[in-house]
Image (cartoon, rainbow, N blue to C red):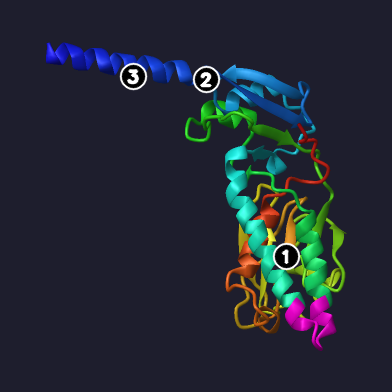
Amino acid sequence: MRSAGLALALALVTAVASAQSPTTIQVRAAGAVAQAGSLTVSASARLATLARAAAVRTDAYILGAAWLRPSLQSSQTRLKAGLLYDLGVMRREAAGGQPAMAELATRLRTMVDAMPVTGRKVGTTLEPHALQVTPQANLPLADGDVLYYPARPETVRVVGAVVKPCAVAHVGLRDARDYLAQCPPSALADGDRLYVIEPDGRVFEQGIAAWNASPPMPVAPGAVLYVPLSPGMLRLGASRSFDRDMADFIATQPLDNPDIGP
């Protein structure tokens, strides 16, 4: 009798849990797709389901495709808040007699403040065929997920401790550091390092000084080069991981003009 009662209780718990679990979820496709918009899919659906339903166009720039997940927004909100706090501290500390530092901190704070928290999951292939034939890449979807496929860009952007942020025409096989000739670092830049943010969100650190020079690193169209701050800037109150955190947050931004609104 006791075993029968336990089995009945477990069955009831399972039934209640099943009733509370949604059987479908809402996901969305945007950008260079033939079928943009919201889609209701099974709660067990995976990336290939949405990519196939979206009918990704041939002119889509697959390398820059973005998977946007509401579940990642909380951690990225904290990352953004930390950057804004550090830049606010740097600006206040520099205001007492270091105007160039204060101006740079203000400019970077404005840049970060304008960046949305997207929930982008970086470094994941979103090529439709690869998703169908590679089980380990075909990850589960969740409610509210968005797949965004941009058009191919023609530039590489250079931001951070530069004289002026700029977009430079992409040149095939050109080393990342060579783009700095057209968008030079400011006197407040770290002259030893450069962060390369590829269109899929992967971040690489490249040594650019004579003592730590890395091998040439060609970048893809749509890449962002983040020039880090000098040690003097960071001593104004930033966390030790500030530059890497900045590069990681920039990596969460889809390529220009994403149609990712609700």
Residue type highlighted by circle 3: Val
Residue at 73% from the left image edge and 52% from the top image edge:
220
* Mark nearer the viewer, 3 or 1: 3
Quarter occupied by the C terminus: top right
Neighbor class of circle 1 (other Cα within 10 Å; few <14, some 14-19, many 20+) is many
Q: Position of residue 188 (x, y in %)?
A: 76, 80
- Label 2 CA crowd tier, 10 Å (few <14, some 14–19, many 20+): few
Pick whichever of labels 2 and 3 is earlier in the sequence. Answer: 3
**Depicted 66 relative to depicted 262: above or below:** below
The image's mark for residue 13 is: 3
Residue carrying label 1:
226
Q: Could you tell whether 49 is left or right of 178 in the image?
A: left
**Span colored in magenta:** 92-102
| In front: label 2 or label 3 | 3
The quadrant of the rendering that contains the N terminus is top left
Query: Can residue 245 be seen at all in this image of the molecule?
Result: yes
Going by the numbered disc 1, the residue's amino acid type is Tyr
Residue 228 spot, x, y in % from top left:
70, 72
Instruction: Tell me the SS state at disc 3.
Output: helix
Q: Image height check: is 178 above or below 254?
A: below
Residue 100 covered by magenta stretch: yes
Q: Please provide percent x and percent y for residue 86.
A: 67, 70
Mark 3 → mark 1, Cα distance in angstroms? 52 Å
At a point 74% along the width and 35% down the height, the residue shown is 149
